[in-house]
């Protein structure tokens, strides 16, 4: 696609879309019966375009990723240490959006959750799913197979360029960080902050920022972006570990070793309500300790299974 095509075709289409949205709603700055201004109504329409994309595309992506696991690996088991994480997986994109934006806590929004479960999500949300141990090229594939529908992944540019699965993840709506350009990275974080506050997304993020490329089981140093984003949005961090993925697709090998089972463990959310930015290092240590404890529990679980 040439630059001329972009200027002559794509740009006019984008401007046409904006004009149609503006024309669809009444050109008035007064509020309607729902108490929404023109800007708010236009924003709601744009939100619905994004949500429709997630609602239609996400189930297809999940199906093919699970099929990939069934064909090549054996199985992917998702373990929940938290009812909140389990309940978030039951919501589609529109349900989560309406749940977060509903101002009356006594109004039930979803079909699958009880009012009490909805209230808990409202109180503790928004949510950031943080995968604390990145050890394999397959981590991104695993995430696509279990991630919630109403979510966006913050991924590095190397993963976005990864053939097929990186392209799919980007196509679903992931935000790409170029670590070599710090200004661009913080602009992505700032954009996600605005989207999360509107109730559009849960966010998936890899705080290590890179894969562990040695046989060491030590966690890499965490980048600060996750903890800044969580505090600024007052979001709860759901700690997540991937276990056994590196036995299927090792960090130093392009060969896939089928027959091994992969696990994902979702822990109890870490709340940040009331935290301020100068507590970000404290939050990071709480998260790191939680990830280590989850890994130990998973190792104990596997050891017990081997004894049977």
Image (cartoon, grey):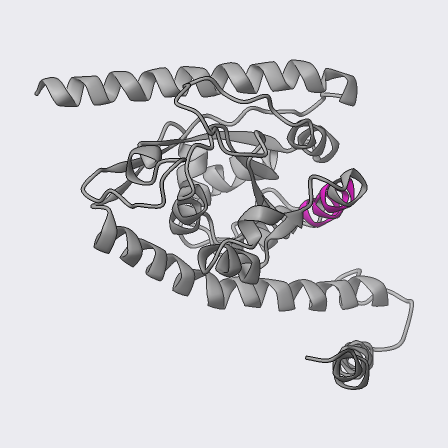
Which region is colored magenta? 186-196
Image coordinates of residue 99 in percent, x first then y, are: 57, 49
Q: Residue furthest left?
A: 308
Q: Which quadrant would residue 230 be assigned to in this image? A: top right
Q: Position of residue 63 (x, y in %)?
A: 34, 60
Where residue 289 appears, as percent x and y from the top left, is 50, 14
Give left or right: position of 21 versus 100.
right
- x 77%, y 45%: residue: 184
User: Does residue 107 appear in the picture of this structure?
Assistant: no
Residue 78 image offset from top left, x and y in percent: 32, 38
Q: Quick check: is 189 in the magenta stretch?
A: yes
Q: Residue furthest right?
A: 29
Q: Nearer the viewer, residue 185 or 273?
A: 185
Q: Is residue 218 above or below residue 31?
A: above
Viewer-proximal residue, 77 or 246?
Answer: 246
Left or right of 181 on screen, residue 57: left
Pick the residue in front: 191 or 160.
160
Left or right placement of residue 106 versus residue 196 in this view: left
Q: Is residue 15 above or below residue 77?
A: below
224 vs 267, nearest the viewer? 224
Quadrant in which the N terminus is drawn: bottom right
Question: Is residue 206 rendered magenta in the image?
Answer: no
Q: Residue at x 41, y 35 (%)?
A: 251
| Residue 187 in view | yes
Q: Across the whole image, how many numbered discs are drawn on residues?
A: 0
In the rendered image, the quadrant that contains the C terminus is top left
The secondary structure that most of the magenta stretch takes on is helix
Name the residue at 24% across, 20% down. 301
């Amino acid at each position: 696609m040439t630059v001329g095509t972009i200027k002559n075709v794509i740009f006019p289409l984008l401007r046409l879309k904006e004009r149609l949205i503006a024309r669809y709603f009444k050109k008035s700055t007064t509020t309607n019966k729902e108490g929404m201004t023109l800007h708010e109504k236009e924003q709601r329409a744009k939100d619905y375009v994004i949500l429709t994309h997630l609602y239609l595309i996400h189930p297809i992506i999940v199906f093919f990723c699970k099929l990939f696991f069934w064909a090549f690996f054996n199985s992917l088991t998702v373990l929940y240490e938290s009812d909140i994480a389990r309940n978030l997986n039951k919501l589609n994109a529109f349900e989560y959006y309406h749940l977060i934006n509903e101002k009356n806590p006594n109004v039930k929004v979803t079909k699958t959750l009880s009012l009490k479960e909805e209230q808990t999500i409202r109180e503790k949300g928004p949510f950031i799913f943080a995968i604390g141990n990145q050890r394999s090229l397959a981590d991104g594939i695993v995430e696509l197979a279990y991630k919630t529908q109403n979510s966006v992944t913050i991924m590095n540019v190397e993963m976005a360029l990864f053939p097929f699965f990186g392209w799919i993840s980007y196509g679903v709506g992931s935000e790409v960080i170029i670590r070599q350009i710090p200004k661009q990275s913080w602009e992505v974080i700032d954009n996600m902050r605005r989207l999360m506050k509107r109730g559009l997304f849960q966010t998936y993020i890899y705080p290590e920022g890179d894969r562990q490329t040695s046989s060491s089981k030590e966690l890499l140093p965490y980048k600060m972006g996750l903890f800044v984003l969580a505090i600024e949005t007052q979001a709860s961090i759901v700690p997540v570990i991937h276990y056994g993925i590196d036995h299927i697709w090792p960090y130093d090998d392009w060969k896939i070793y089928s027959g091994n089972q992969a696990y994902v463990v979702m822990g109890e959310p870490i709340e940040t309500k009331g935290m301020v930015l100068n507590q970000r290092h404290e939050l990071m240590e709480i998260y790191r300790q939680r990830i280590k404890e989850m890994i130990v529990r998973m190792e104990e679980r596997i050891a017990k299974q081997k004894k049977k």
